[in-house]
Image (cartoon, helix red, strand yellow):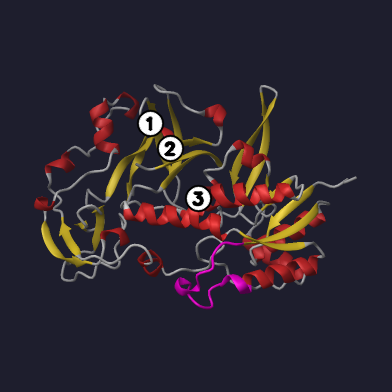
Amino acid sequence: MRTKPRVVVGLSGGVDSSVAAKLLLDQGYEVIGMFMKNWHDESVTISNECPWMEDSTDAMLVAEKLGIPFQAIDLSEEYRERIVDYMFAEYEAGRTPNPDILCNREIKFDIFLKAAQKLKADFVATGHYCQKREIEKDGNPVYQLIAGADPNKDQSYFLCQLSQEQLAKALFPIGHLQKPQVREIAKAADLITAEKKDSQGLCFIGKVRLPDFLQQQLKPKKGKIIQIPENLPVFDRLSVPAGIDPVDWDQDTLDAICLPIHYSQDQGKVLGEHTGAHYFTVGQRKGLQVGGTGKPLFVIATDTQENVIYTGLGEEHPGLNRYGLFVKKNQVHWIREDLALTPGESAEYVARIRYRQPLSKATLIMRENGLYVVFENAQKGIASGQFVAWYQGEECIGSGTIF
C-alpha cells in the first residue's frame, strides 16, 4: 500500500530538472526519473550542444545520485508526428510556429503524462520556471498558471496552452526559485549537472540549425525580395482612432488593425533574391543579404505561394509595427475556463507575443468569428502562427495562435 504520492520527473539532463527531482524527494514524494528521447537525427544537431546521448547519461547519473528509479522513453515517433511535421507544415504555409509551446501541450503534458500514469504516478514534474496555485470556485478546484519567481527565467509563456486537466497533474518544483539558487542546490547535492550550461535548442532535442532542419523537407527555391514603401494607402488604415475605445470600434476598423496585410508585387521594387520564402519570418532582419539600403531591412510579410518576401526599411516601417492581431475562434484557449469571454464581451489584460517580451496592455474583444487583441502600444513583428498569451498580473489566463 503506497503512502507517498508518486511523481515522475522529466529528467532532461539539465540542472533545472535535476533540482526539481531533488526538491520533490526532500518534500516526501516517491520520485521516478524519466528521460524523453525525442530525436534520432544527428545530421542537423550542432555538435557539443547537448546531444541527446550526453543528456541521457547525465539524467541517469543524477537519478543514481538521488537514489531514484530511472528509465528512458522513446517518444521520437510521436514527436515527429506532433511537433516536427507541424513545424514543416507551418513554415511551408508561411507561418512561424513555436515548437516549445506545442512540445509542452502535446508531448510533456500529454504523451509523457500518459506514460507516467501507466506507472501509477499521481503527478508529472518538470524543471520549468513557473508556478501553480489552486483556488476554489463554486466548490471546485481551479488551477492557476503563475509566472516563475525569477523574471529572467519565467517560462509561463511556454506553458500557455495547458488545460485545467493537465495543470491538475503538473508540478513545478523550482518555480519559486532564482536560477543561481537552483545551481547552489545542485552543487550542495553534488549533482553532475550543477555547472552544466542551459540548453538553447528545441525542447529535448538540442540546438538545431534551423535552415538545415527545414531543408530536410522544404527545398531551396529562389524568389524575389521586394521593398514596400512607407506611404502605401493601405497603411493609412492602420492608425488607431484617437479617443475611441477599441471596444467601440466598428468591424472594419477592427479588421484593418488586427488582420494581416496582404501585399502585391507591383506595390514595391525588387531588391534582390532569396532562397525560399518559407525560411523567413515577419520581423526577421538577418539572412536577407541585401546591402546598400542605409537603414536596416526587415521582413514585413512572406508569400509562400508566390515565393516572395516583402520587406520594409527601418524599425519604424508601418508594415512592421502593428497595434492588433486576430485569433480564430477554434484557436482561442483559456487556461482559466471560468474567465472565458463570450461573443460581445471584452476584457483588459497584459499580453505578449513571444518569450521574454515585456508584457503590454491589451484589450481583448470577443466576436463570433474569434478574438481580437488590440495593444496599447504597437508590437513589432506580429507573425501568423506565433502564440499570443494574456495575463492578469502574474497569472497566465489564456492564449491563442495568431491568424
Distance from the alpha carbon under mark 1 to that under mark 2 = 8 Å
Badge 1 vs badge 2, beta-carbon distance below 8 Å: yes
Mark 3 lies on a secondary structure that is helix
User: Mark 1 or 2 closer to N-term?
Assistant: 2
In the rendered view, tell whether residue 22 sits above or below residue 230.
below
**Residue 67: image tag:** none
Q: Choose top left, top right, bottom left or bottom right for residue 218.
A: bottom left
Q: Residues within 10 Å of mark 2 (few under 14, many from 20)?
A: some
**Residue 331: image tag:** 2
User: Mark 3 or 1 closer to N-term?
Assistant: 3
In the rendered view, tell whether residue 293 sits above or below residue 300.
below
In the rendered view, tell whether residue 58 sits above or below residue 402.
below
Q: Position of residue 171 (x, y in %)?
A: 69, 48
Return the residue at label 3.
Answer: 102
At x 37%, y 25%, the residue is 368
Q: Which residues are magenta?
A: 37-54
Camera-nearest residue between 235 and 393: 235
**Residue 370: image tag:** 1
